[in-house]
Image (cartoon, helix red, strand yellow):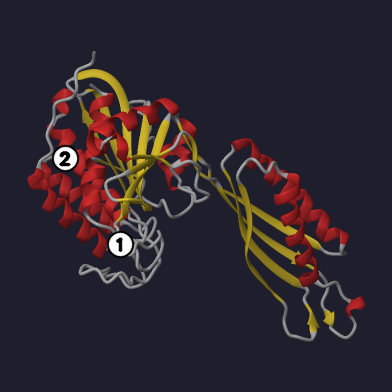
């Protein structure tokens, strides 16, 4: 039987990690603008005497080499913030007006730093290496894909990767896991529906782009509920419709924006094909035409069974088996970790942050906040997983 990895958590580091998180929370930066965040991460690593490398404009990664050859694995944390004005009432609020860590990435970054510190201290126990990736731009499209293209998974070739996300729907001290799909793809669309303007008193002389848009929206609902397999999770959402000049004129152009989500790669392709055909046919049937911009965004995050099993075994040593919760079904939210899960066996788990005595706000809410003790749970789990995988 394989012997458990012997390592100890440095309790004296806790206050340092809490201070790091507070600094990051006070100085949030938007996607691809994380220059000061990058410098701060580098400063912490310099203070600890841990070497690192930069990648793309604002990314950082740390390679921790073990004493012997073995597997090459990766841990990932996202570092960017959101264009949200903070209303959390914490005593260390954002100092960057209109920008907030409303998705917990300040916690994710601190968690990975805590794991880096301990893995560096215990690197003599590793057989192989662990790459710790501080990734910019998760809230924007394509950041993970850019890092992959820049070689973040090569030299050495990474064999598996994990990530976490704080989760207000689970209690503090628990994690949530699932095998298979865990988050959805997110593709965006912009439609420009063209008609022919005219006077509202003589609608037969014009082609009403607003009326055509109504028919397109109804057609998309038909696609969502009557064409696609209802057993496979999917959403087609129209979030913005803009057009028309006045109350007594016929609209000659309407712009429609929305998103499409699914947790299945094949259905993702199927939806796009049906979407394009149906939208064009509907516009033409009513005398108009439409320009379609269909933007492929994040792929779904799909967890590997074996990597998830190992993550659960490692996490059980930190939080206990009873505190590992089956998520049951995927979320229709998205995360660009899907680009990694397309390339490698991976798992993406939820880190509980809710407390009975506190009102817990959802991700991206201006009042979002979490107990800093979640940072310790997350960092310990990351560390335990890496040591177990490379023992």
Mark 2 or 1, closer to the camera:
1
Tell which of 345 and 59 is nearer to you.
Answer: 345
Tell which of 75 and 304 is nearer to you.
Answer: 304
Q: Which residue is drawn at 38% across and 55% down?
A: 32
* Image location of residue 66, percent across then percent down: 20, 24
Quadrant of the rendered structure where residue 254 is? bottom right
Q: Residue at x 72, y 56 (%)?
A: 221
Q: Which residue lies furthest to the right in this view?
A: 204
* Image location of residue 91, percent across then percent down: 20, 69
| Mark 2–mark 1 distance (CA, rounded to whole Å) | 25 Å
**SS of the residue under disc 2:** helix
Disc 2 crowd rating (10 Å Cα; few below 14, some 14-19, many 20+) is many
| Residue 307 visible somewhere in the drawing | yes
* Image location of residue 142, percent across then percent down: 48, 47
Left or right of 184, for residue 191:
right
Left or right of 201, for residue 373:
left
Which mark is on residue 314? none
Which residue, given by chain and number where applicable, does mark 2 sit on? 117
Q: Which residue lies furthest to the top in this view?
A: 1
Which mark is on residue 369? 1
Tell which of 379 and 76 is nearer to you.
Answer: 379
Left or right of 190, for residue 305:
left
State which quarter of the image contains the N terminus.
top left
Q: Residue at x 16, y 49 (%)?
A: 44
């Amino acid at each position: 039987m394989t012997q458990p990895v012997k390592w100890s958590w440095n309790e004296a580091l806790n206050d340092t990690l809490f201070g790091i998180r507070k600094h990051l929370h006070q100085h949030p930066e938007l996607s691809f603008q994380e220059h000061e965040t990058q410098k701060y991460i580098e400063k912490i690593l310099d203070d600890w005497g841990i070497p690192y490398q930069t990648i793309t404009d604002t990314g950082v990664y740390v390679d921790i080499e073990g004493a012997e050859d073995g597997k090459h694995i990766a841990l990932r944390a996202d570092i960017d913030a959101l264009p949200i004005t903070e209303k959390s009432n914490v005593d260390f609020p954002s100092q960057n007006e209109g920008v907030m860590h409303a998705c917990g990435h300040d916690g994710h970054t601190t968690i990975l730093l805590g794991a880096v510190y301990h893995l560096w201290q215990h690197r003599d126990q590793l057989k192989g290496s662990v790459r710790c990736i501080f990734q910019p731009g998760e809230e924007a499209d394509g950041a993970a894909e850019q890092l992959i293209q820049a070689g973040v998974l090569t030299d050495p070739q990474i064999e598996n990767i994990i990530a976490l996300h704080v989760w207000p729907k689970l209690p503090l001290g628990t994690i949530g896991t699932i095998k298979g799909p865990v988050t959805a793809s997110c593709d965006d669309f912009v439609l420009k529906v063209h008609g022919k303007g005219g006077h509202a008193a003589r609608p037969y002389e014009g082609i009403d782009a607003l009326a055509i848009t109504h028919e397109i929206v109804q057609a998309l609902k038909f696609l969502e509920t009557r064409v696609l397999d209802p057993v496979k999770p999917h959403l087609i959402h129209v979030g913005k419709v803009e057009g028309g000049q006045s109350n007594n004129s016929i609209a000659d152009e309407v712009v429609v924006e929305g998103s499409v989500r699914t947790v299945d790669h094949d259905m993702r392709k199927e939806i796009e094909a049906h979407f394009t055909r149906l939208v064009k046919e509907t516009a033409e049937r009513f005398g108009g035409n439409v320009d379609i911009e269909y933007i492929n965004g994040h792929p779904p995050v799909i967890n590997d069974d074996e990597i998830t099993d190992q993550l659960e075994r490692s996490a059980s040593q930190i939080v206990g088996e009873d505190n590992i919760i089956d998520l049951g079904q995927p979320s229709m939210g998205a995360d660009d970790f899907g680009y990694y899960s397309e390339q490698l066996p991976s798992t993406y788990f939820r880190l509980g942050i809710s407390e009975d005595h506190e009102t817990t706000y959802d991700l991206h809410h201006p009042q979002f906040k979490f107990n800093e003790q979640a940072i310790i749970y997350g960092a310990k789990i990351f560390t335990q997983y890496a040591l177990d995988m490379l023992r």
